[in-house]
């Protein structure tokens, strides 16, 4: 297989082939939302019950309403994230209201990191962070499968070295 072919770059013609994020990222984010806002609701209810009156404890329902709103927003945000590998660059698209599309040329990449915190590791997720010479074009792809994150890191590093060497 020759380097730079459509099969090698994941593109067909001029249109990039977009890849979305795994559903486990959405599950992790929603679980964190429920845990943190649930703890806030319980703590607020107890505090208001003890310091004010039982009627004031009803205000603890506000974090629960925020949980429902956040649930929907997290789903929309997760669905907006995608990335595509092209012949000369990597595209990252995200955003619902303010849509952003970042184009990172392979030749400009200086460092490609794969990171995974304890919660991400529990959900078998990893993030890929791309560093370039210009700080404004640094980009991150969150919540990938660890194998995909490592494959992407290796491929981007290989393509970055080849492009910066002028091959």
Image (cartoon, rainbow, N blue to C red):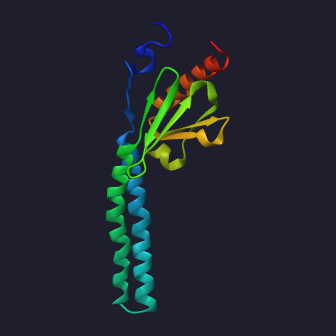
Residue at 50% across / 29% down in the picture?
90
| Residue 44 figure quarter | bottom left
Residue at 42% across / 86% down in the picture?
48
Q: Position of residue 3 (x, y in %)?
A: 50, 11
The relative height of residue 143 versus residue 147 in the rendered view (above or below) is below
**Is residue 125 among what the camera can see?**
no
- Please tell me which residue lies in front, 79 or 87: 87
Direction from residue 65 to residue 159 in the image, left or right: right
Q: Position of residue 21 (x, y in %)?
A: 40, 39
- Please tell me which residue lies in front, 123 or 95: 95
Q: How many marks?
A: 0
- Please tell me which residue lies in front, 130 or 153: 130
Residue at 41% across / 42% down in the picture?
81
Q: Quadrant of the N terminus?
A: top left
**Is residue 160 among what the camera can see?**
yes
Q: Position of residue 64 (x, y in %)?
A: 34, 70
Q: Position of residue 43 (x, y in %)?
A: 44, 77
Residue at 39% across / 52% down in the picture?
97
In the displayed orientation, state which residue is furthest to the top: 1
Q: Quadrant of the C terminus?
A: top right
| Residue 8 figure quarter | top left
């Amino acid at each position: 297989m020759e380097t730079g072919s459509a099969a090698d770059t994941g593109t067909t013609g001029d249109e990039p082939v977009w890849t979305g994020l795994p559903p486990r990222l959405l599950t992790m984010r929603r679980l964190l939302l429920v845990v943190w806002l649930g703890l806030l609701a319980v703590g607020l209810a107890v505090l208001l019950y003890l310091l004010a009156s039982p009627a004031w404890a009803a205000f603890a329902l506000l974090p629960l309403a925020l949980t429902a709103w956040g649930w929907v927003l997290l789903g929309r945000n997760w669905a907006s994230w995608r990335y595509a590998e092209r012949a000369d660059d990597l595209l990252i698209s995200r955003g619902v209201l303010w849509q952003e599309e970042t184009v990172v040329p392979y030749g400009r990449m200086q460092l490609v990191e794969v990171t995974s915190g304890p919660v991400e590791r529990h959900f078998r997720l990893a993030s890929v962070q791309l560093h370039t010479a210009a700080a404004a074009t640094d980009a991150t792809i969150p919540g990938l499968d660890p194998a995909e994150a490592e494959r992407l890191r290796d491929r981007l590093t290989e393509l970055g070295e080849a492009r910066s060497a002028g091959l």
